[in-house]
Image (spheres, rainbow, N blue to C red):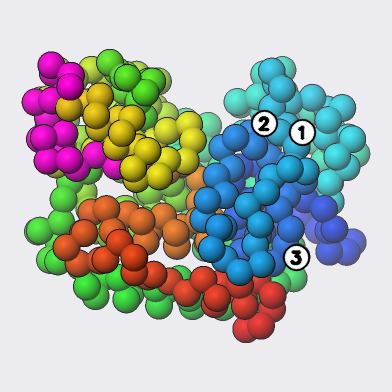
Amino acid sequence: MSIEPAGKVTFESVPETWVAENASWGDMGVALGLEKPSAVVLTGEYRTWAYEDIPGLSTSKEDMVSLWQDGISKETLLEIDSGVHFIDPNYMSNLIPNWERADVTEMADRISPFCGNTSFSTYPWHEDYPYYSLYEATEKVAQVFQRMDRFEALQTLHDETISGIQERLPPESERPAIGLLSPASTEPEKYYPYRLDDTTAYKHWHDLGVSDAFEASDIQSFTSDRGTIDYETLLEVDPEIMLFYTDKYWTRSEFRETYLTFLQGHSVASQLSAVQNGEVYPAGGMYQGPIINLAKTERAAKQLFSDIFDQDEQLFSRQRVANIRNGDI
């Protein structure tokens, strides 16, 4: 198997255990029928709500290790002794304190390869090698675990599901511009903005054909400059719809009782069109593999096009996902 930036990666046999950088890579393996990874960098960012109604798939993360403990230690990786690390080696050397590429090479030699690609968001250190699409990355996992039949079935299910949704959407000129934001608290006075780029975090928004409300502004993505914006800046843009990345999974009612109620009572936020029209929704997390993507696409379609998609309608087959996981292609 070949994957950038690791290059060619070989295994003597199919790995029995595995570690994932985040929920995107974790969900790729789960969608292919594997048990959840032994560890991810932050277990709190692996949202398993999408697994709730997939037959035979547990939402539990009870045995999953969170690698980040004020950093990532070599001792933790050695103790886990994984058969493969779906972690971008450049992620380790650029974002993890006290790690250099030589440390990654050492751990790869002592344990197993680091063969991920950080594709959910853009980074300056990622400019010299490609970002993988969700299914390009999933194919790499399928190659390592020799589950190409499941991969092909997942891709077919995805294509059929997305096509079925897109056939029902209004013309592109009638689709909304969305403002993606991460609130600094549950009673926010500032936000971390996100631009709608081409990485995997935004796949479902692109599939639904919506546009970026910040496109014509000077607002940069939080992942680029770590900047924040306030309500005055938001009012200048005045997004039709606001979607919040938050630190946990929110049901629709919990979200509205917490965030929308606060915004409606705020002297400035209450002037925003999205707040006045009740068009403020949870955006989920940044990470998604095949199952989470299907669930996030379904939820987003119902949020943005509630006059087309009924709230109780299932836009993808949960049983078909379960069958693919089980190898019943």
- Residue 301, image quadrant: bottom left
Q: Secondary structure at mark 1?
A: helix
Q: Residue 208 location, x and y as percent?
A: 28, 60
Instruction: Tell me the residue at 44%/59% (across/down).
Output: 295
Alpha-carbon span between mark 3 and mark 2: 23 Å
Instruction: Tell me the residue at 21%/26% (across/down).
Output: 263
Q: Which residue is mark 2?
A: 92
Alpha-carbon span between mark 1 and mark 3: 22 Å
Q: Residue 13 location, x and y as percent?
A: 88, 64
Is the C-beta separation of discs 3 and 2 under 8 Å?
A: no
Report whether residue 19 is seen. Answer: no
Tell which of 226 and 68 is nearer to you: 68
Alpha-carbon span between mark 1 and mark 2: 7 Å
Instruction: Tell me the residue at 30%/30% (across/down).
Output: 259
**Upstream in sequence: badge 1 or badge 2:** 2
Magenta stretch containing residue 93, yes or no?
no
Residue range in magenta is 265-281
In the image, taking residue 324 as reference, residue 85 lies left or right, namely right
Exactly how many numbered labels are in the figure?
Answer: 3
The quadrant in which the C terminus is found is: bottom right
Q: Which residue is mark 3?
A: 145
Q: Residue type at mark 3?
A: Phe
Q: Which residue is mark 1?
A: 104
**Upstream in sequence: badge 1 or badge 3:** 1
Is the C-beta separation of discs 1 and 3 under 8 Å?
A: no
Establish if 119 lies above or below 329: above
